[in-house]
Image (tube, rainbow, N blue to C red):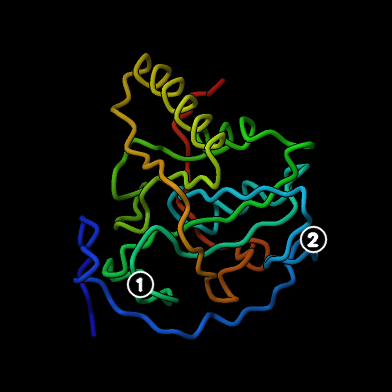
Amino acid sequence: MFFSKPVEIPDKDQALSGRDEKMQINPKHYVHGRSMVSPFPQNMERVIFGMGCFWGAEQKFWDVEGVYTTAVGYSAGHTSNPGYEEVCTGMTGHNEVVLVVYDPGLVSLQYLLKLFWESHDPTQGMRQGNDRGTQYRSGIYFTNEMQQQQALASMRDYQAKLSAQGFNTITTEIRAAEEFFYAEDYHQQYLEKNPAGYCGLGGTGVFSS
């Protein structure tokens, strides 16, 4: 069965229902061997980013000093425990996202936000380059009030820089993180497992603070 991709996020009563069973994955990170699933060390914080193709988004963060672990998955939608094919229909409401677990004593959220803004084009709405659909939207999903404040401040700052270079208004959604559903094993650290894999992620060439 083939589905067209809606350009609007479906209402909850329109979304696919999903299932109760969680995705079973190998919890060991393919790059550095640390666990991708909780419990994490007590000093760690979590933030979730949507930047388009989650293969390339994850790669931007897993080697950052102070980042404990990363994982790709689905969030900010309605469907329980979705699979990749379901997300690609546009009928789950979910975004393709990367979970970043980091030590704030070693790496600042401001630095992670800098990577976020500079690594994709946050003005493109429901797409990123040639990847089109609601699952490719730009998003920052915060887990505490301080993250929210920093994310909003960084967006205002980056918008000023983008506007000065002739770019359109940022379409990034900034909202509280909801449940993170892990993507299938083969998506985790995909570009490390498949170095020649395609990912259309690209920035604007405008640097943030």
Task: Tell me which residue sits at (29%, 28%) in the image.
Answer: 169
**Quick one: label 2 or label 1, which is nearer the N terminus?**
2
* Image x and y of residue 52, in percent: 43, 51
- Residue 205 located left or right of residue 29: left
- Residue linked to disc 1: 79
Q: Residue 89 placed where, x, y %?
A: 28, 71
Q: In which quarter of the image is the N terminus?
A: bottom left
Which residue is at a point 74% across and 60% down the rendered structure image? 40
Where does residue 163 sit, x and y in percent of width and height?
34, 18
Quadrant housing the C terminus: top right
Q: Name the residue under label 2.
A: 32
Q: Position of residue 39 (x, y in %)?
A: 72, 65
The residue type indicated by label 1 comes to Thr
**Residue occupying the point 36% across, 70% down:** 87
Amino acid residing under circle 2: His
Q: Height in image: 153 above or below 42?
A: above
